[in-house]
Amino acid sequence: MKIAVPINKNMVNQHFGMSENFAIVTVEDKKVTIVEEISAAEFAHQHKGLADLLVKQGAETVIAGLQQNGLTVIKGATGEYMKVVEEYIKEH
């Protein structure tokens, strides 16, 4: 499974459409195996473009506030993005 998180340094960015970077976190057997940071600066304020970018990266779940292109959305996340991802993994 791949999880996409809009980030600002190591924190979840609360403004999805203004996120210049996303963490793409690969999870296997409930463990984080790969963390990649991708740039999304060219898609600022373009939710559809951002969603397409995340789908092309293989993301299935977004921890933020967007629901497009068949992505599962987890809303209301705050704090350090790796802690948020780890909490999500424990619950799912």
Image: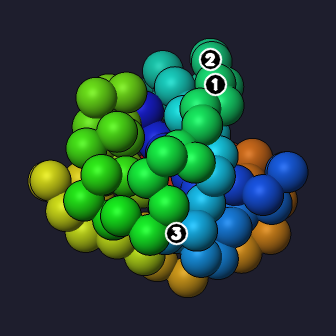
Q: Amino acid at mark 3?
A: Phe
Residue type highlighted by circle 1: Glu
Mark 1 neighbour class, 10 Å CA radius: few under 14, some 14 to 19, many 20 or more: few
Q: CA distance from mark 3 to mark 2?
A: 24 Å
Instruction: Give the residue type at disc 2.
Output: Thr
Considering the numbered disc 2 on the image, is that residue within a helix, a strand or a loop?
Answer: strand
**Marks 1,3: beta carbons within 8 A:** no
Which residue is at the far bottom? 76
Quick check: marks 3 and 2 in contact, CB under 8 Å? no
For marks 1 and 3 on the same chain, the one whose residue lies earlier in the sequence? 3
Q: What number is the disc on residue 85?
A: none
Cα gap from disc 1 to disc 3, whole angstroms: 18 Å
In the image, which disc is placed on residue 36?
Answer: 1
**Residue 90 in the figure: left or right of residue 79:** left
Q: Which SS class for mark 3? A: helix
- Decide which of tag 3 and tag 2 comes sooner along the chain: 3
Q: Closest to the observer: 73 or 9? A: 9
Q: Which residue is mark 2?
A: 33
Give the left or right position of residue 64, taking residue 58 as reference. Answer: right
Name above or below for residue 45 compared with residue 63. below
Q: Position of residue 44 (x, y in %)?
A: 50, 61
Q: How is the image coloured?
A: rainbow
Q: Position of residue 12 (x, y in %)?
A: 71, 63
Instruction: Determine whether 34 is above or below 7 in the image.
Output: above
Residue shown at 43%/75% (left/top)? 65
Disc 2 vs disc 1: Cβ atoms closer than 8 Å? no
Mark 3 = which residue? 16
Q: Residue at x 14, y 53 (%)?
A: 70
In the foreground, 50 or 30:
50
Dot in front, 2 or 1: 1
Name the element at disc 1: strand
